[in-house]
Image: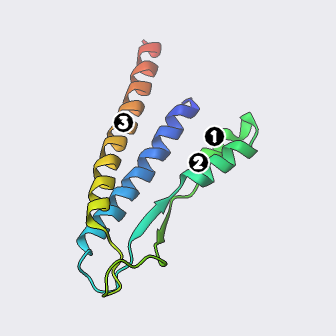
Amino acid sequence: MFSNSVYTAEKMADYLWEKQKATMNNIANSTTPGYKAQYVTFQDELRQKLHNGKASEIRNGIRNSRIRVETKENESTKLDGNNVNVDVEEVELASTTIQYQYALRSITDDLARLKSVIR
């Protein structure tokens, strides 16, 4: 019933929500000794599934793309082993917030068009 754009925007909103949570967790733990920053992956897996899939498999590729939280193990910027750069995290949070609002707006617009067609 929905177009692939609705499914994509929904998955992107889920990804951005997880990314916001990881970023806020990084900021909250920026002074915790030994804490390693987390990041969220999703786009590469989705791109691969969409690139390798046929048109009929796109929807399943969108739905089955996993959102994963990873840890930045190899980076250490402080003597205590903590690798959170608060400045970078705050910029990331602001950017992610704007992208999240855009994804929600995209879903709302698609649903408004569908509602208009139904009338």
**Three-letter code, disc 3:** Tyr
Check if mark 2's residue and mark 1's residue have beta carbons within 8 Å. Answer: yes
| Residue 93 locus on image (x, y percent) | 30, 54
**Three-letter code, disc 1:** Arg
User: Residue at left 39%, top 78%?
Assistant: 36
Whether residue 105 is situated above or below residue 26 in the rendered picture: above
Whether residue 99 is situated above or below residue 31 in the rendered picture: above
Distance between mark 3 and mark 2 Cα atoms: 20 Å
The quadrant the N terminus occupies is top right
| Residue 44 locus on image (x, y percent) | 59, 53
User: Residue at left 53%, top 39%?
Assistant: 7
Is 55 in front, or is 42? 42
Mark closer to the chain start, 3 or 2: 2
Mark closer to the chain start, 3 or 1: 1
User: Residue at left 58%, top 33%?
Assistant: 4
On screen, residue 91 versus residue 19, left or right, reads left
Within 10 Å of disc 2 (Cα), the crowding (few <14, some 14-19, many 20+) is: some
The quadrant the C terminus occupies is top left
Dot 3: element: helix
Per the rendering, the mark at residue 59 is: 1
Q: Is residue 64 visible?
A: no
Report which residue position mark 3 lands on. Answer: 102
